[in-house]
Image: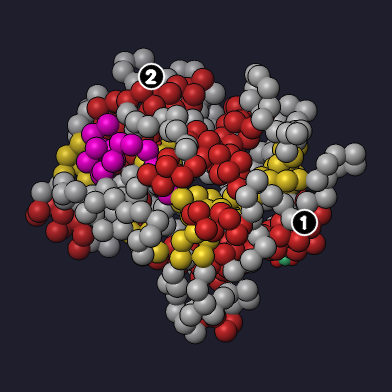
Amino acid sequence: MSAPNVLVFGGLNTCSRTLVGLLVPLTGEPLVGNVRVVDKFSVFPPTTYIGAEFAQLLTRPQVEYKQANLTVPATIARMFDPPEGQAPYEYVFDFTGEVQFDRTEMIQIDRTCQVARMIALEAAKRKVKAFVRLQHPFYETSAKGSHDEKEDIKPDGVAGTWWHETLRMLAAIDDLNLVILRIGFVYGPYINWGSIASAITVASVYGHMKKPMKSMWSPGKNPTNTVHAEDVAGAMWALAEWMAPKGRKEADTLAGEAIIFHNEKSKAASVQGMPPPDKKLIAPLFNLVDDSDSTLLSVGQTVTSFFGTTFEFFNFVENTVLKLRADAVEEINEHHVGGWTEMISTSSPPIPNTPLSAYMDKWALEKHVLALSNRKLLEVVGYRLKRPTFGKETIGEVVERWKEEGSWPMLRASE
Ligand SMILES: *[C@@H]1O[C@H](CO)[C@@H](O)[C@H](O)[C@H]1NC(C)=O
């Protein structure tokens, strides 16, 4: 059997680059025949951060990049047409969706639901053997215990609602060989998106200033389960391999879960492709987090200790004052951003531009609670975590890569 050809949609700004690096490593044998990566960004020259490794991957003969407007169905269909002489694409990895948390409902419907749905419809039409959808941790769970795929966890905000609705829309496509991977807070080399990258950057500023990093949220048990990007990539691949010989019916029998309605009932009439609220929808769904049981406290302690400082909590009075003030977000950021700018501008060699920012938006400063169980993926698919521990070692690697490519300040004294 020859290695499959693979389509990767979206996620250039989150974690699809890591998957491409797994499928076609810089050195060594590719796992696939050819990979076509499709996203809205330009890569020559890049209009988003792509990292030094992906720039090199693009020179591999097996890797092709297409810049495309994925809101146009005809464009999506064209992306499924292989180059002349090449076998059709057999696996599709769907990383699409608007990941910025402050986007409106209309933007979420157009860029998250409709884009994924159109790609999925085309994939079903072409009978691809596996369609693996990445679901970000836009949910709130209870802080107690860890939550498996059977549990009804609550989508978080506008983004969460429509990302979750997208899963229902995909689940409703019966002949789509769909499998969903729902992840924790992702971090890893060349990943500048998300709250962990932000925490690493901000912790470095406090380390530089030799001050404790302080959180607005009480030290109680606030799970914020993490996952390494190499495991996101590894699990996406493992799920494609698991799905391909089975097909949707068998996969539903082995791993199907109810994708429960979590939206306003009235929306179903106006949103194209949205299944009726009472329609029972089943799809294979797997959680993925690492084995660290990360919490706000453990993540805070790990990142700050890496940069030689400590993680503390504002006291009750400080907190009450902060939360009452509309400009609290701006004031907190003044410290981070000023410190980071100073680090960047005193770096030797200089850093002409960096994809990293110490600015924490409202969402990043809000409290998030997410505890997922990864047991099902390990037991049903037999996946083994490559990076089970969120720790100083994995953070060190992330920072090291940023240093090598000139994205991270090189300071004489300490970090
Ligand atoms: C993508 O296509 C849609 C629909 O034609 C259009 O409204 C939008 O402006 C396009 N986006 C870009 C970046 O060209």
- The answer to which image quadrant residue 292 occupies is top left
Q: Residue at x 59, y 82 (%)?
A: 270
**Residue 303 counted in the magenta span:** no
Q: Which structural element holds mark 2?
A: loop
Rendered location of residue 72, percent (x, y): 74, 63
**Residue 294 counted in the magenta span:** yes
Label 2 Cα neighbours within 10 Å, binned few <14 / some 14-19 / many ≥20: some
Vertical order, 344 against 143 (above or below): above
Q: Pointer 1: what residue?
A: 126
Q: Residue at x 64, y 32 (%)?
A: 23
Q: Nearer the viewer, residue 93 or 177?
A: 177
Q: Pointer 2: what residue?
A: 411
| Placement of the N terminus among the 4 image quadrants | top right
Q: Amino acid at mark 2?
A: Leu
Q: Is tag 1's residue or tag 2's residue first in the polypeptide sequence?
A: 1
Q: Is residue 375 left or right of residue 308?
A: right
Q: Which residues are magenta?
A: 287-302
Q: Residue at x 45, y 29 (%)?
A: 386
Q: Which structural element holds mark 1?
A: loop
Q: Are marks 1 and 2 in contact (CB under 8 Å)?
A: no
